[in-house]
Amino acid sequence: MIINNLFSCESGRNEIEKVKFVAKLSAHELPSENVSGKSIISYFGYTTDFLLTRGTSPKKWILVGAPTSQDKFQSSLNQPGALFKCDPFGTSSSCEQIMIGRGGNVEDRDYDKVQIYHGKDKGWLGASLAVGDAVLVCAPRWQNDIEKLENQTPLSHMNGICYEIPRVLDPSLVDKYAFLSKDKDQRTLNETHYYYHYMNGMMGLSRKTTCILEMIIKDLC
């Protein structure tokens, strides 16, 4: 397995320690044989990144995206994608799925109280992944099913969505960003119909984090 995107902004880790870690990692295969949700079509390993958790007992993880995997926490969904944490020096069963939401395709509100209706099926969660001050993982094929919000004819917008996870990997602290907070920037009214500018924006198809991830996201919104 090719390990890419391994270095992010890791405060306090010098370059020599990074090189030592990669040297150790190169002698091991990432555990993947018995991952829950993994299958021949899950694209397990499509994205990877390195995470050193913070706290009194820091832990090293390899984060692995599987953008067409099933989600054991949302079994009603069809291949929404999943994110796993793997012990790089563990056994073949040492990968665990990280819970990122568990409500399925339901009405919700994003971080800025904007009403959305999740269309997570085949959303490709894990197609992009990066670690900075927090973990950023995106589902660029996520859809906002606005017909269920506005009683329209079938219409879904493939806006894409990203999730920010604290480095402690606490699922109760996950923030979601659909970047739909400025309604005037999302659609234009022409007589009696709205025309949406970003119906297929696929936000999150690529990503870049910095050590000030939260500040940048808030500025963009």
Image: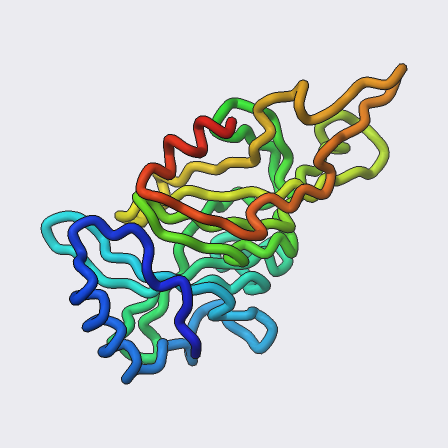
**Quarter of the figure with residue 106:** top right
Question: Which colouring convention does the figure follow?
Answer: rainbow
Q: Is residue 137 left or right of residue 194?
A: left
As drawn, the residue found furthest toward the top would be 191
Q: Is residue 183 left or right of residue 163?
A: right
Residue at (86, 21) in percent of width and height: 193
Residue at (37, 48) in percent of width and height: 135
- Image spot of residue 201 (x, y percent): 67, 42
Q: Is residue 43 left or right of residue 31?
A: right
Residue at (62, 40) in percent of width and height: 118
Return the residue nearer the eye: 216 or 112: 216
Residue at (71, 28) in percent of width and height: 149
Return the residue nearer the eye: 165 or 6: 6
Q: Does residue 170 appear in this view?
A: no
Q: Does residue 142 appear in this view?
A: yes
As drawn, the residue found furthest toward the right would be 191
As drawn, the residue found furthest toward the bottom would be 27
All told, the count of numbered labels is: 0
Q: Is residue 183 above or below residue 116?
A: above
- Image spot of residue 211 (x, y percent): 31, 42
Return the residue nearer the eye: 168 or 204: 204
- Image spot of residue 4 (x, y percent): 41, 67
- Image spot of residue 136 (x, y percent): 42, 47
Q: Is residue 132 above or below residue 220?
A: below
Q: Is residue 196 left or right of residue 74?
A: right
As drawn, the residue found furthest toward the left would be 56
**Quarter of the figure with residue 129:** bottom left
Return the residue nearer the eye: 115 or 182: 182
